[in-house]
Image (cartoon, rainbow, N blue to C red):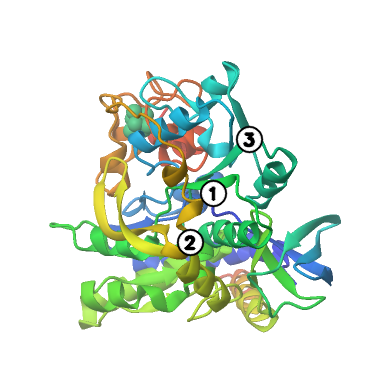
Amino acid sequence: MIDRETLSSEAAAHALVERIEALVTEPVALMEVCGTHTVAISRFGLRSMLPPDLRLLSGPGCPVCVTPLVEIDRAIAVARTPGVIVTTFGDMMRVPGSGSSLEAERAEGADVRILYSPLEALGIAESEPASEVVFLGVGFETTSPTIAASVVAADKRGITNFSVLPFFKTVPAALDMLAALPGRALDGFICPGHVSAIIGADAYEPVARDRNMPCVVIGFEPLDILGGLVMLLEQVRAIKDEGAHARVENQYSRAVTPEGNTAAQALLADVFEECDAEWREIGMIPGSGYGFSERYRSFDTRQRLAVNVPPPAGPTGCICGEIMLGLKLPTDCPLFAGRCTPRDPVGPCMVSTEGSCAAFYKYDRNDSCGS
Amino acid sequence: MCLAVPGKVLEIDGDTARVDFGGITREANVVLVPEAVVDNYVLVHAGFAIQVLNEAEAEETLSLFRELAESLDDEAKRGTG
Ligand code: SF4
């Protein structure tokens, strides 16, 4: 059913690029807030196909990149605690904390294991009952339901040596903050496809309505992205020329409904409750995170393990914050590709494969640097 | 991090489905998609099916792209492209 050949047809891509060229008659800036989009745009080389007046900016779409330094330090402190097994998705391993990383701790003997699914942590907890198994709860609404489901499963199975360090972030509150920035330089949002599969396209209605910000939910194949850009640019044009009002549109209707996945939403509402959350290099965004609900609070690692986390010491000279706010591109950072590389990263955007600096380093560097 | 991969449900046994990803079969938990049935396509993320794909919508998107491709071919044939 997913005919990838059609989804990457060159002739259709040309037709869409022609439409985009006709629609971009003055500078336009669109922001993607999903690391998977960042990587897809770079990997397919879309920037080089598009008119120079169309700027595609990478927002805070990588959950690893927006996890505050103090939380990375907390995860490291937990990993150093005797009797603890830290389990995590792989992207967290190399993120530098103040003086170490999970990868460095593992090399020093800490028990840190990379998992594909949070469910695997339950099996570890059952087979190693003397250990405390901690899962690092990083992710947006695509991932948080899978962790909520694992917590409910642990509860049903009577597993008491499993807990989660919650670093969850939610997308709509962050979009609202970005859309409300003074002197905003953004003309529209490329809304994240798989976050939207859970929360539904309607979740962006307030941003479109109250901030007059065009929002289009877009899939991840090259033609999805180009087709979605046409939809966004048509809205931008209608707002400028006819005084139209911004709307939410859904290019990725094969995976995203207006209301989203209601079973997943019910699970999120049961296991978590909304809280304010700190986004690395950006700051506090009200109502943009999840903590545990009272019913499941015993699964919060912070309730079970007291660790001492000294005040964090961050990297200097890193402009990840400005990049994630859409104010700068990675190539504007003086450390980019010199002092800061994926092998020896300074900031979080260079570590995670979905970070904007890492995506630029891998795919766009030559174009952007003009070399 | 939010990458999700489409696959076809081959079999469902309680909370667990066997899903075919173009010849590779893996298990996926289906508690988040209680409506899923055998032969559905689902999006799988971190070991969980997170959404059932809508085949009619998928076909509509594909036919839109096919039309676009053909329109460009026609233009090229007419020498106006
Ligand atoms: S290149 Fe490195 S130091 Fe510069 S903004 Fe990106 S991650 Fe930070």
Residue B8 in which image quadrant: bottom right
Residue B42 in which image quadrant: bottom right
- Tell me: residue A370, above or below residue B76: above
Tell me the crowding category of disc 1: few under 14, some 14 to 19, or many 20 or more residues within 10 angstroms, Cα based.
many
Q: The N terminus of chain A appears in which quarter of the rendering? A: bottom right
Side of A306 where A89 appears, left or right: right
The percent position of residue A156, horizontal first and vertical second, equals: 65, 63
Q: Which mark is residue B1?
A: 1
Q: Which residue is mark 3?
A: A131
The answer to whether marks 3 and 1 mark residues whose Cβ atoms lie closer than 8 Å is no
Ligand 1: give its quadrant: top left
What is the three-letter code of the residue carrying label 3?
Ser
Q: Which residue is mark 2?
A: A141
Tell me the crowding category of disc 3: few under 14, some 14 to 19, or many 20 or more residues within 10 angstroms, Cα based.
some
What is the three-letter code of the residue carrying label 2?
Glu
Q: Is residue A8 visible in the rendered structure shown here?
A: no
Labels 3 and 1 positioned on one and the same chain: no
Secondary structure of the residue carrying numbered label 2: loop
Labels 3 and 2 positioned on one and the same chain: yes
Q: Chain of mark 2?
A: A
Q: Chain of mark 3?
A: A
Q: A27 or A123: nearer the eye?
A: A123
Secondary structure of the residue carrying numbered label 1: loop
The percent position of residue A58, horizontal first and vertical second, equals: 38, 49
Q: Which mark is residue A338?
A: none
